[in-house]
Image (cartoon, grey):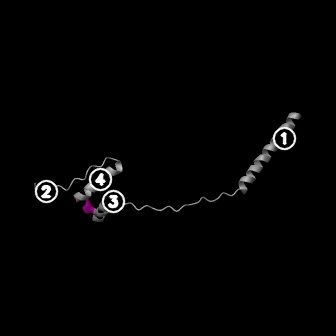
Amino acid sequence: MEGKTLARLGAIIFVAIAITAAAIEMVRQDDPPVQERVRALEPAQDPLRDGQRRCQQLGEAAANDPGCLRIWAETRDRFLGRPQQPASPHPIEGR
């Protein structure tokens, strides 16, 4: 009989602790996280991005434009993480 009574007492204590913990958790109020204003950084003017905009405005004609082809190649290299090569000047025709 002694073991049975001890088990019941242990169960009652366990349930009492569980109810107390649940009540404390329900009453507790978390402070809302403080949101600091984050200032958006304006990136410096990127000539590559300007070239992309120009090519976008050209539409289908950009597919035949050597400047747009060069800009797309540089964009692809930047995206893939390839080392940047110095921009070659436009080839002079007629030589």
Q: Secondary structure at mark 2?
A: loop
Instruction: Give the residue furthest to the left.
Output: 95
Q: Are marks 4 and 2 in contact (CB under 8 Å)?
A: no
Q: Which mark is residue 76?
A: none
> Which mark is nearer the camera, 1 or 3?
3
What amino acid is labelled 3 in the image?
A: Asp
Q: Which mark is residue 93?
A: 2
Q: Earlier in the sequence, mark 4 or mark 2?
A: 4
> Which mark is nearer the camera, 1 or 2?
2
Q: Earlier in the sequence, mark 3 or mark 4?
A: 3
Residue 75, magenta (yes or no): no
Q: Secondary structure at mark 4?
A: helix
Q: Secondary structure at mark 3?
A: loop
Q: Which mark is residue 9?
A: 1
Q: Residue at x 25, y 55 (%)?
A: 70
> Which mark is nearer the camera, 2 or 3?
3
Q: Which residues are magenta?
A: 60-64
Q: CA distance from mark 1 to mark 3?
A: 74 Å
Q: Earlier in the sequence, mark 1 or mark 3?
A: 1
Q: Secondary structure at mark 1?
A: helix
Residue under label 3: 46
Q: Where is residue 90 drawn, in percent x and y?
A: 19, 56
